Amino acid sequence: METKNSNAFVLKELNILNYDHITMVPPYARGGGGLALLWKKEVELKILYQCDNFIDTEVRFQGKIFMATFVYGEPEKANRKEIWTAITERTAGRDLPWFLTGDFNEILDNSEKRGGPPRAESSFVDFRSFMSECDLYDLRYSGNFLSWRGIRYKYNVKCRLDRAMAIVRGSRLTLPEEVSI
């Protein structure tokens, strides 16, 4: 989850949840960024890599093994492609199922946005290319898919910035029909 707060504040607030393990990445901008990943002792989770924008893991649970990457997408549009490239390079050649989820700070097309002027088609190329290169399937959602809202210039804008994606490789792991995020 994106924390937007200092690690000390997040730890204080999350202690009541009684998770056995927690790893955190502090926010790198005021009011934005930061990641907290919490899990129970029944889940064997190995952190393979972490940076300001994602935590990459290997998960073992109930006899299944899969990869999971938790994302906070770069808020600066000019820097997003660098994050997609880093994830692509770090995960290339994997043959296990892969689950990718988080706040990507990006949309696939104008149908994932309400309010404000439409974006140019060319503005979606980098994120679409990332998903295509990684062979990721955008999982269905339930509920309101417009997970972010804010004021941009004089417009009230809502977007689908949070999502879950997956690819099933070399395994009989079954993914749920819907994922609530």
Image (cartoon, rainbow, N blue to C red):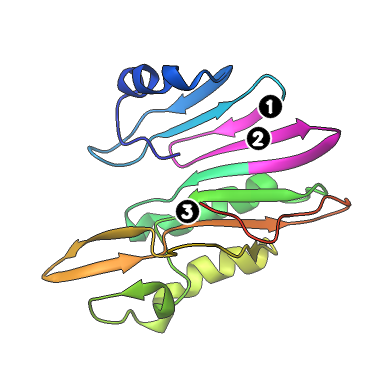
- Mark 1: which secondary structure? strand
Q: Residue placed at 77% from the left, 31% from the top? A: 60
Q: Mark 1 is on which residue type?
A: Lys
Q: Which residues are magenta?
A: 44-68
Q: Residue placed at 88% from the left, 52% from the top? A: 172
Q: Is residue 74 left or right of residue 89?
A: left
Residue under pointer 3: 82
Residue under pointer 1: 46
Residue under pointer 2: 57
| Tag 2–tag 3 contact (CB < 8 Å) | no
- Mark 2: which secondary structure? strand
Q: Residue placed at 22% from the left, 37% from the top? A: 30
| Tag 2–tag 1 contact (CB < 8 Å) | yes
- Mark 3: which secondary structure? helix
Percent position of residue 151, x then y: 17, 63
Quadrant for residue 26, please give it.
Answer: top left
Alpha carbons under labels 1 and 3: distance apart? 24 Å
Q: Is residue 139 above or below residue 170?
A: below
User: Of the residues tagged 2 and 3, which is closer to the observer?
Assistant: 2
Precedes in sequence: disc 2 or disc 1 = 1
Alpha carbons under labels 2 and 1: distance apart? 5 Å
Quadrant for residue 1, please give it.
Answer: top left
| Tag 1–tag 3 contact (CB < 8 Å) | no
Percent position of residue 109, x then y: 45, 77
Q: Mark 3 is on which residue type?
A: Glu
